[in-house]
Image (tube, helix red, strand yellow):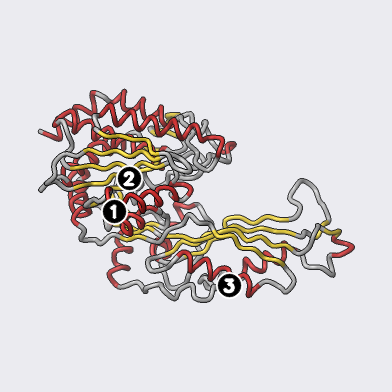
């Protein structure tokens, strides 16, 4: 009867719920761009008001050095468990704009999908969770357990202010488990849980060979070319068989066990072929590991961008004096981001010609990897719910991406994080034409409500 009552509630409010999803997708809450600071404040204010409408007793907009944090609390009973619900309301930049078939903040609906930046990552997850909470409150007057809410506006830029907030406020944020809404499915229509997320390190390399660009005919045979120096350095980061060639990079990496490989193989059996899904012409990577083992369980180094010299139309015969490279590493448990950055710095120093200046500026916004124990009580209860809702057992799968704050929850609160979200594979998160299926909205609402019930049981 409870499920039927909830389904009726969601159905009777379908138009209202969809309209509010469209409204928030039209807010360009791009955290990387200072020009959108007011949009992030507007998005945070929307969440505050929405939570107050539901009846959350305490909701506060916490100012930070960057974008605000929305903190909420609903204390139900001293004897009940405490669940911290985490999400983020910021989104990636929409560039390149010319590749969008409709405006990135238009929230266009076509072919059974909503197309908008932030639809999958992760505004619709956040909205459907609040809608699920509304349905529970309309039925019972309160949630089935004590809730703490933390919604941030800086996940896409590393969560630095939320990390600081957690460190400073850990004593009053104690909880029994964390529910992260920043997640998705391993295969279309197949429920699943992120059970391992990678950490990261990285930064920018700046090469300088002199004070100015030079005429390539007058000096090209006698002076170093910054682009060539950088290209040679970039090539030194990997061995021919795909391993990262930085000395000490793998020292803390634990080998995969048979159980690890079996878990990954099972999840891969329901997921799309990597080459097919990505659209690449061929696969590449560390020998001895299957594609999904590399993606979810092996550390990586990626060159994200390289530039230098003349890149305009036509030709300009110069020998450039400066060149630049951005890189990121995706790290696995036991690898320390600061240590990896030091190893990168040492590798650069070792491979740069004498007399050439090379500066490495490490990003400060990365965290360590996170993996939840598979027998964790909250994960097991949530998995049971998803099995009931979808009629098939959920898949535990590892992702090559990062949600930096999950490690910090463990570090500061001692709490494990259950990651449950409803975007489907194939949606181009962080790329043009990001989408979320309309049919997944009611499923997300039902599932989040049922998971809250299950986590609140004695």
Task: Please provide percent x and percent y for residue 58.
Answer: 27, 34
- Which mark, residue 127? none
Looking at the image, residue 438 lies above or below residue 321: above
Dot 1, how many residues are within 10 Å of its Cα: few (below 14), some (14-19), or many (20+)? many
Q: In the shown orientation, is residue 33 left or right of residue 351?
A: left
Are the residues at dot 2 and dot 1 in contact (C-beta closer than 8 Å)? yes
> Residue shown at 54%/36% (left/top)?
100
Task: Please provide percent x and percent y for residue 102.
Answer: 51, 31
Are the residues at dot 3 and dot 2 in contact (C-beta closer than 8 Å)? no
Q: In the shown orientation, is residue 301 left or right of residue 357?
A: left
Residue for badge 2: 86
> Residue shown at 70%/66% (left/top)?
357
Label 2 sits on a secondary structure element that is: strand
Task: Note whether residue 327 is visible.
Answer: no
Residue for badge 3: 346
Residue for badge 1: 417
Task: Please provide percent x and percent y for residue 171.
Answer: 28, 52
The answer to which of marks 3 and 2 sits earlier in the sequence is 2
């Amino acid at each position: 009867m409870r499920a039927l009552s909830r389904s009726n509630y969601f159905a009777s409010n379908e138009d209202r719920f969809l309209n509010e999803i469209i409204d928030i997708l039209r807010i360009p809450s791009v955290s990387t761009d200072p020009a959108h600071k007011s949009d992030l404040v507007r998005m945070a204010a929307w969440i505050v008001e929405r939570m107050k409408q539901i009846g959350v007793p305490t909701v506060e907009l916490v100012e930070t050095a960057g974008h605000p944090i929305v903190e909420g609390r609903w204390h139900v009973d001293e004897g009940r468990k405490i669940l911290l619900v985490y999400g983020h309301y910021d989104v990636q930049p929409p560039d390149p704009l010319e590749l969008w078939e409709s405006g990135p903040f238009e929230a266009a609906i076509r072919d059974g999908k909503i197309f908008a930046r932030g639809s999958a990552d992760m505004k619709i997850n956040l909205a459907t969770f609040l809608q699920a909470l509304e349905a529970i409150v309309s039925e019972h007057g309160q949630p089935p357990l004590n809730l703490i809410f933390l919604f941030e506006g800086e996940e896409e830029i590393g969560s630095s202010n939320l990390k600081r907030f957690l460190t400073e406020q850990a004593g009053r944020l104690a909880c029994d488990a964390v529910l992260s809404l920043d997640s998705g499915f391993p295969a279309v229509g197949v429920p699943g849980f992120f059970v391992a997320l990678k950490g990261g390190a990285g930064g920018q390399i700046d090469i300088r060979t002199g004070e100015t660009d030079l005429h390539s005919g007058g000096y090209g045979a006698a002076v170093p070319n910054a682009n060539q120096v950088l290209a040679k350095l970039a090539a030194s980061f990997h061995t021919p068989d795909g391993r990262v060639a930085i000395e000490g990079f793998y020292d803390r990496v634990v080998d995969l066990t048979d159980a690890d490989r079996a878990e990954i193989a099972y999840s891969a059996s329901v997921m799309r072929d990597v080459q097919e899904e990505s659209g690449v012409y061929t696969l590449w990577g560390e020998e001895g590991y299957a594609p999904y083992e590399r993606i979810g369980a092996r550390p990586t180094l990626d060159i994200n961008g390289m530039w230098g010299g003349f890149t305009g139309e036509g030709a300009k015969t110069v020998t450039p004096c400066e060149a630049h490279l951005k890189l990121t590493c995706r790290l696995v448990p036991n690898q320390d981001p600061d240590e990896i950055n030091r190893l990168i710095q040492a590798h650069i120093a070792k491979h740069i010609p004498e007399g050439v200046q090379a500066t490495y500026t490490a990003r400060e916004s990365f965290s360590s990897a996170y993996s939840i124990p598979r027998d964790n009580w909250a994960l097991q209860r949530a998995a049971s719910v998803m099995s009931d809702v979808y009629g098939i057992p959920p898949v535990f799968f590892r992702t090559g991406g990062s949600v930096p704050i999950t490690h910090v929850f463990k570090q500061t609160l001692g709490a494990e994080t259950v990651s449950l979200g409803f975007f489907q594979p194939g949606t181009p998160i962080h790329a043009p034409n990001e989408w979320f299926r309309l049919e997944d909205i009611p499923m997300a609402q039902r599932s989040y409500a049922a998971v809250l019930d299950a986590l609140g049981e004695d």
